[in-house]
Image: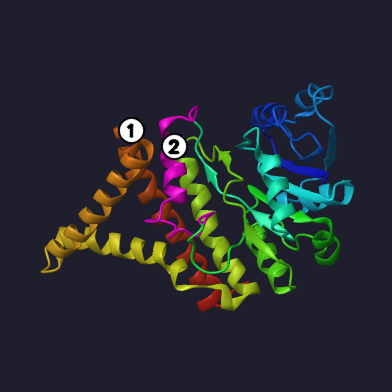
Amino acid sequence: MFFSIIIPLYNRPQEINELLESLTHQTYLQFEVLVIEDGSTADAKTVVEGYSNRLDISYYVKPNEGQGFARNYGFAKAKGDYFVVFDSDCLIPPDYLNTVKNYLYSHPLDAYGGPDGAAASFTPVQKAISYSMTSPFTTGGIRGNKKGIGQFHPRSFNMGISRQVWEKTGGFIITRLGEDIEYSIRIHKMGFKIGLIADAVVFHKRRTSFVQFFKQLHFFGRARINIYKFFPGELKLVHFFPASFTLFLLFTIITNVIKTPLTYLCNIILTIFTLLIFFHSLISNKSVKVAFLSIIAAFTQLTAYGLGFIQDLWKRVILKKS
């Protein structure tokens, strides 16, 4: 099995350097790497050229259209039997491709996704953000969890498709705002077999500050409504949780200001939720600092996603604006 690794890139030369370095340590060597520079002003040409004698690597430059169409560009150039997509802020463990290859031989899949986690080298903030994005108390276990809710949808930070899927689907039809989930749903609806390879883990750096994290998750909340416009049936009850949490948090703040009979109950509920996050993160990360930061990350994630979700639900669904 020959893999084509597709990496869209926009103004992140340092990130691609760390990602490519991790790929040089793969134990399975039947793969090529395609880096698609999507109209960057700070390009990574010099960085990529530095790996020309260590990887089977190609570098392409195209006008900026967003990550979805940059991946399509890579698919069209790829030579592999199977296309693997990574985000540029990932680090890939040495046994990743070997794990995927062995799984696909024993459990054939047309498309797959894998989990993400935090590497030991990550900062405490990055570890807290990673915890928040994978915690059962924030995402409900829908991101790379064997016991996740509903149909599993691979995400673009760690996903793969067969050449047949690319040829039949034509790739991404939107380039941002939930493009990977839309593509995963469409692959499933066309009858292809999708699955989770639980051991195909990547280390996902995500954002380095809570401000950046807030902006990213606000975008994710808006993206869920964008997916709803394509597939109304894919909007599940679990997707309303961040918005409900955001409204509950606002209500709790108001009750504490005006002192209503519900103030005590709201504070108790919020305290229990906060303690659950703290102790679960403490057990998972074995760090008091990361556990405290996980509370900030979780509240940031839920409120940012919730606000983005509410914003576009009101604008695009209730008011029916474009």
Count of labels shown? 2
Q: Earlier in the sequence, mark 1 or mark 2?
A: 2
295 shown above or below 208: below
The stretch in magenta equals 120-145
Taking the view exactly as shown, the residue that stands out farthest to the front is 106
Q: Which residue is mark 2?
A: 127
Given contact means CB atoms under 8 Å apart, are the residues at marks 1 and 2 in contact? yes
| Mark 1 surroundings: few (<14), some (14-19) or many (≥20) residues within 10 A | few
Q: Residue at x 27, y 51 (%)?
A: 276
In the image, residue 214 lies at what x, y percent? 46, 47
In which quadrant of the rendered view does residue 95 lie? top right
Q: Which residue is mark 1?
A: 287
Closest to the observer, 111 or 266: 111
173 shown above or below 74: below
Q: Residue at x 57, y 51 (%)?
A: 198
In the picture, measured across the screen, residue 38 lies left or right of residue 152, that is right
Name the amino acid, label 1. Ser
Q: CA distance from mark 1 to mark 2?
A: 10 Å
Closest to the observer, 177 or 186: 186
